[in-house]
Image: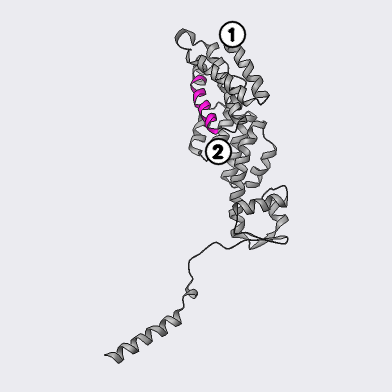
Amino acid sequence: MADAKALIDDLSRQVQANDIDGGKATLTKLKIWMLEISGAQATPDALALAASALELGVLLAVADDDLDAFGRNISQLKPYYAALSSSGAAASERKCHVLGLNLMHLLVDNRLSEFHAELELLSEAEAGTPFVSFPITLERQLMVGSYDEVLNAGSNVPDPSYSFFMENLLETVRDSIADCVEVSYKSMKLSDAVTMMKFDSTAELQEYVQEKREDWIVEGDRLTFQPPPIGSKAEDIPSMNLIAQSLSYATELERIV
């Protein structure tokens, strides 16, 4: 177990130093050690060390922008949390941080049923921590359409590790705002669109238009929205021409008969 403690210390330093490759190598060694924990060796101290290793693995995956590794570490971590809880052991310092990141992941992926299932497992004290209350508040704001508050939340994350998920969430929110704007306005000033969609500059807005909204037109200092495609209206049907053609066919048929 002394070797495991030393490896966890190494992993902690590597995560703090953003040493992704070194951290992955150390985490692999720790996971091999975790496979050897069974029976009498599965003491509360050993379980706590294993949970700590996986918590650091979660933070390492966020730093590496690796959602697959993030999900794997979370799945592997849950049985250790359950075992520690049943043994009466104290929760780790990083637990609420990790739980909050997992809620952010579920929120970004729009897996709301899983999001609420995870909330049911939280204690009142855990739900009240800044790490966990942050995604809970975000979810409520999204449900009522308070997109402006969601966008502003990006500058008030409880930890820099949340920024990874906030960037993805902000993109989703901006797309929702854009969908609303283009059906609500025929055109607007670029400066107003920048403010409404929380871009830092007009250049960022123009880049967004080029990448995602090819049907929007930038003319001078104004942004013009193309109307969404709709079906043909009654006035679009050339009814008089059709009537004239029908009468002509009827006349010709009568002559033939």
Quadrant position of residue 124: top right
Magenta-highlighted residues: 67-80
Q: Mark 1 points at which residue?
A: 2
For this rendering, which residue is in front, 82 or 52?
Answer: 52
Instruction: Give the farthest residue toward the left.
Output: 257
Q: Where is residue 82 in the image (x, y as percent from the top left)?
A: 49, 20
Q: Where is residue 198 in the image (x, y as percent from the top left)?
A: 69, 48
> Mark 2 or mark 1, which is nearer the start of the sequence?
1
Q: Residue placed at 58% from the left, 10% from the top?
A: 3
Q: Mark 2 points at which residue?
A: 107
Q: In this view, does 205 lie to the left or right of 240?
A: right
For this rendering, which residue is in front, 80 or 141?
Answer: 80
Instruction: Give the farthest residue toward the bottom.
Output: 255
Kind of residue indicated by mark 2: Leu
Closer to the eye: label 1 or 2? 1
Q: Position of residue 212 (x, y in %)?
A: 59, 52
Q: Is residue 77 magenta?
A: yes
Q: Is mark 1 on a helix, strand or loop?
A: helix
Q: Position of residue 119 (x, y in %)?
A: 53, 31
Q: Residue placed at 67% from the left, 35% from the top?
A: 157
For the question of whether residue 78 can be seen, the reply is yes
Main SS type for the magenta part?
helix
